[in-house]
Amino acid sequence: MPQTTANGIRIDFETHGDRDAGRPLMLLRGLGTQRIQWPPPFLEALVAGGHFVVTFDNRDIGASQWFDEAGVPAIPDVVAAVRQGRDPGLAYDLHDMADDVVGLMDALEIATAHVAGMSMGGMITTVVGYRHPERVRSLVPIMATTGNPDLPPATPEAMAVLTTPAPREREAYIAHQIRSGKVIGSPGFPTPDEERAEMAGRVFDRAFHPDGVARQYLAIGVTGDRRPHVAKIAAPTLVIHGTDDPLVPVEGGRDIAKTVAGAGILEIEGMGHDLPAQLCERIARAISEHTRKAETR
């Protein structure tokens, strides 16, 4: 698959649809996940909705550049440094990852684009919105948050999924991913174990990289409360969030919608912290309607 240099690093990407006929849409994945995890029906629906879609592996995951030379600092050491106002010495934060998005746009000669992302990708979406406002046509943060420390936290079970190291043996990893998916997935739209197992095997075989996941997790933490910056976003914004999300509770999405002037919000009953097949068409349609309106404002 194509790779390019963006923001000074190697980024693995793929495009979907007709560049000349579609509205450009940068699509951002979440913590530790790869671009191959976007459901094909979701991408097909976005293309049918009038988009030229760019998917890619975030830095430090998949086939994009890894940062293993930076090591993985201990979380207590990072927390202590932040509290004392010291540089925690991380390889990057969400601002760097937002710059990667714009760097990829530069490499592909895309002047402006709609930007949508899920989970960590949704957080990066908002960072792109306030850090590079001149490059953004509209924003769609999905199952994301502002970093507001007063919001409800993840459930203990969901937090355990997030913080438990993934097994390094293939079959154990697949079983771990099935269990994790049941905890954070959509109770109203369950995904069969066979589907989770097939995808987990593909992800493991393509690029198993737990240290990158750990560094991305720390990048979220050190970027902190982004509300003062998010409040400056002027691009048309649609927030999408599940009401049954145990990892990033729906209050996180509501906080984005409250912070960004004029933002809309779509709350989906029964949706957790995943993108189930049953919701691909609905979410793609909502994104398409939003970007179409943004083009005519």
Image (cartoon, grey):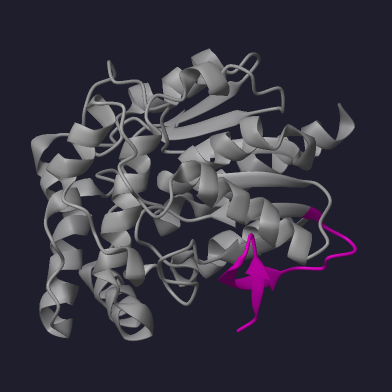
- Up/down of 230 relative to 54, above or below: above
Q: What residue is drawn where x is 49% and y is 64%? A: 38
Look at the image and tell me whether residue 23 can be seen. yes
Answer with left or right where residue 274 lies relative to residue 25. left
Region rendered in magenta: 1-23
- Up/down of 247 relative to 1, above or below: above
- Up/down of 92 relative to 148, above or below: below
Between residues 146 and 79, which one lies in front from this camera angle? Answer: 79
Look at the image and tell me whether residue 122 can be seen. no
Q: Quick one: quadrant of the C terminus?
A: top right
Coordinates of residue 169 in the picture (x, y in percent) = 13, 82
The answer to if 258 sits in the magenta stretch is no
Q: Quick one: quadrant of the N terminus?
A: bottom right
Coordinates of residue 276 in the picture (x, y in percent) = 39, 55
- Up/down of 20 relative to 128, above or below: below
Between residues 22 and 97, which one lies in front from this camera angle? Answer: 97
Answer with left or right where residue 206 lies relative to residue 46. left
